[in-house]
Image: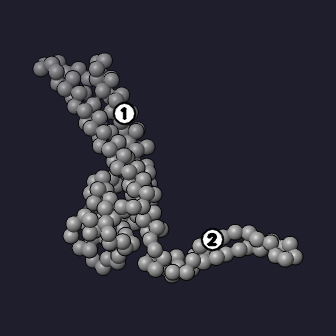
Amino acid sequence: MGLGAQAQQSAPIQLSPEDQGRGLNGVQKNFFFAQGSAKTDKDYQNAGFFGQQLRPYLAGNEEALDALNSYRRQKWLFVAERLTFVGAVGVYGQQVLAKSNDYQYFNGTQKVAIGVAAVSLLSNIFIVRNTNSHFQRAVEAHNAGMPAARVGLLQRLQPGTVGLATSATGRPLLALSWNLH
């Protein structure tokens, strides 16, 4: 099935049970999702590291795409942070082993490398804090934008407009209206 056909099929997206439970500071691995109801693990497909496999399903829903773009940005920051940390550890290790017979553990370059590694680890806390919630928001925004007939009974019963009006005697009234499809 091509991406165009996937994008045209509009059904609610369901995250795997394991991914639904991911919270703040959760693991940074790929999400798995299914269109409609999934009965087995084989029904779920990998969304990709940056969520790129989910993008065709969200086409046309700006709120969902914005959340997915935020997720992708956070994942790029995560990759950059990991590379910075590995680079700093590599520089420190190279500096320790620079002299063949006399190891030196705390010269100026090593202090900078330790500082960069520490800042990298601290930034990781802030980077991964909400990364998973951006992906979950993208799925929730997609499902919230679905036609009422496909989402469920509660969405069908939701009023189309809510407002205030006054009665003939001047008392305030709550005005509700529903869109009939």
Lower sequence index among marks 2 and 1? 1
Which of label 2 and label 1 is nearer to you? Answer: 2
Q: Which residue is mark 1?
A: 118
Q: Nearer the viewer, residue 70 or 117?
A: 70
Residue 118, image x and y in percent? 36, 33
Residue 1 appearing in the image: yes
Residue 44 is left or right of residue 64, and the answer is left
Extreme residue toward the left, this view: 100
Question: Which label number is shown at residue 161?
Answer: 2
Question: Which label number is shown at residue 155?
Answer: none
Quadrant in which residue 109 is drawn: top left
Residue 26, image x and y in percent? 38, 55
Quadrant in which residue 179 is drawn: bottom right
Q: Amino acid at mark 2?
A: Thr
Residue 89 is left or right of residue 166, and the answer is left
Q: Is residue 100 above or below residue 25?
A: above
The structure residue drawn at horizontal position 32% and vertical position 44%, both measured from the top left corner, is 76
Q: Nearer the viewer, residue 73 or 133?
A: 73
Residue 131 appearing in the image: no
Residue 85 is left or right of residue 180, and the answer is left
Distance CA(mark 2)–CA(mark 1): 52 Å
The structure residue drawn at horizontal position 21% and vertical position 29%, both measured from the top left corner, is 93
How crowded pointer 1 is (Cα within 10 Å; few <14, some 14-19, many 20+) is rated as: some
Residue 74, image x and y in percent? 37, 47
Q: Label 1: state its secondary structure.
A: helix
How crowded pointer 2 is (Cα within 10 Å; few <14, some 14-19, many 20+) is rated as: few
Q: How is the image coloured?
A: one colour
Q: Amino acid at mark 1?
A: Ala
Work out which quarter of the rendered image holds the N terminus and state it.
Answer: bottom left
The structure residue drawn at horizontal position 23% and vertical position 73%, both measured from the top left corner, is 42
Q: Nearer the viewer, residue 47 or 55?
A: 55
